[in-house]
Image (cartoon, rainbow, N blue to C red):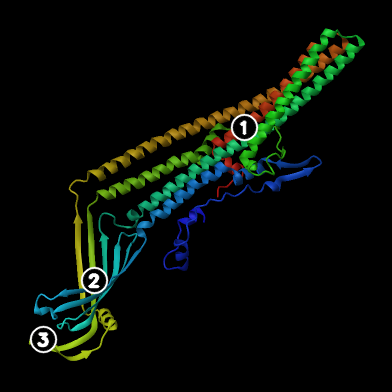
Amino acid sequence: MATAALAQISSFPLPSYFRETFARPVTKVELQPPVHLSDFVIEDKEGKKLELSLKSYLDLVMANNTDIAVSRLTVDVAQNAVTRAFAPFDPFATGRFTSTRSKTPASDALQGANTLVTLSQPALFTYNQLLSSGTNYGVSFSATKTSTNSGFQNFNPAINSNLQFNFTQPLIRNRGMYVNRLPIMVAHSRLRATQYALRDLVMQLVDNAENAYWDVALARDNLRVQERALELANEALKRAQRELELGAMSPLDIYQPQQAYASAEISVSQSRYFLLQREDALRKQMGADLDPLFQHMPIVLTETTNVPDTGTVDSEVEVQKALLHRPDLKAVNQALDYDDLQIKSAKNSLLPDLSLLGLYTAQGRGGTFYQRQDVFGGGSQIVSITPGGFGDSLGQLFGFGFPVYQFGLQLRLPIRNRAAAADLADAVVAKKHDTLMVRGVEQTVRLDVLNAVTQVESSKESVKLARVALDFARKYLDAEQKKYELGTSQIYFVLQAQQSLVNAESALVQNSIAYKRSLLNLVRRTGELLDERGITIQ
């Protein structure tokens, strides 16, 4: 049974009430395996691979990520609290039946027997409920059957029934639907705050997951750069070996290209293992590490590190977006709503407790009637017997011929209510505190967005400069190779130019990924990350 459904047990006397109430409690928790992974499997000549775009990857994260599944449970708890807040308005029914037989020695002649034997069988049924208006009403029905061997008893067995209606209506404190539904409104307010907190937490987890995606993309492209560097080092080594064989190079100069080739091999090996580590972290984010079929399946990312031209970002526009969408800001604003409810609740507790009371009772009597004569003369003879029973008692009861009415007022006036006064003062202080918290969060939001915008512009400029540096590195390598071919330069400078090209290519990859991360951070800081990625929280 789902956690939210556990708080929704059916009402008596529906058949499902007995099935759900008396069912064996389910204590075993069954975790579902990761889903939808097979939807993104492709197969080529190298075997099966998991092909992931950013959107498909984030869909898998939302479906399979354990941290996100844990965070969703907080909303279930808050929803259960809303259900619990309705508990004071749940009706309550009581039924009771007892049977008592007693045998006592007579202490005087008026008891009608030497040994008095009595059988008493009372039954009671009550129904009570508190309405949202504050009215507390109750209905009770009682019936008692009494049998005795007393010679003085006219009705034997005697059946007495009683039907009673009563109510209590607050006139000052706890009067009206608004006051009595305050706990429900408080629970709803806390639920909304929990939902905002969940959205903020999911945004953080999605941000972490997307950064893991770009970690793999960075490691993948960096491996490609190192592999190209290995190719350049290999070409330089082969050329140096040919020159050594032809006698155009000193034997002492061959060590430099050999060392460059060995260093390139080390870089490729390190990059390859680093990519494996990043892929393992990616599998954890989308739950692929839980399925043996996907634990070692190669991952292919379809997103490139190409940088889109986003134009100039207006920082003030982004700040306004953040003030509108940030869930953490909505959560602290929701706290103000909660504080208002607490103030109203504390103010209600200060009021005098004046209640209107009302009661109506109908009575009935039935049973077999024994007409007796000479009761006190010693004979106590039965003249006639009139049969009767429970129906007679009910007929008299619902004839309403023997009513009892009662109305009254009850006033509870605390001379000094320090506890309620302190609660009200605390509620006012809490609202002042939360109002300042709203201001502080707004300042933090503004600073976060401004820093994020600055980071985006800085990353964009870094990408442009990295492209320029890469172009110069290519020209530098081309120039050194031509000079080396003409004999005006040494192999050392060619290798140095090759390393400069590798560094420039690596810098472009890193700055491109940094720009992607900056854009991600910006939509995270404005609170639009989930909407931008098309993610909804169920």
The residues tagged by marks 2 and 1 sit, at their Cα atoms, a distance apart of 74 Å
Q: Residue at x 61, y 29 (%)?
A: 456
Q: Nearer the viewer, mark 1 or mark 3?
A: 3
Q: Give the percent coordinates (x, y) of residue 402.
A: 21, 78
Q: Give the percent coordinates (x, y) of residue 164.
A: 26, 71
- In this orientation, does residue 457 appear? yes
Q: Residue at x 62, y 32 (%)?
A: 517
- Residue 147 falls in image quadrant: bottom left
Indicate which disc, 3 or 2, sits on the residue closer to the N terminus: 2
Q: Is residue 365 above or below residue 384?
A: above
Q: Which residue is mark 1?
A: 517
Number of other residues with Cα within 10 Å of mark 1, as a class: few under 14, some 14 to 19, many 20 or more: some
Q: Which residue is mark 3?
A: 375
The residues tagged by marks 1 and 3 sit, at their Cα atoms, a distance apart of 105 Å
3 and 2 marks in contact (CB < 8 Å): no
> Is 527 in front, or is 247?
247
Q: Give the percent coordinates (x, y) of residue 199.
A: 52, 43
Q: Which mark is residue 360?
A: 2
Q: Mark 1 falls on what kind of element? A: helix
Number of other residues with Cα within 10 Å of mark 2, as a class: few under 14, some 14 to 19, many 20 or more: some
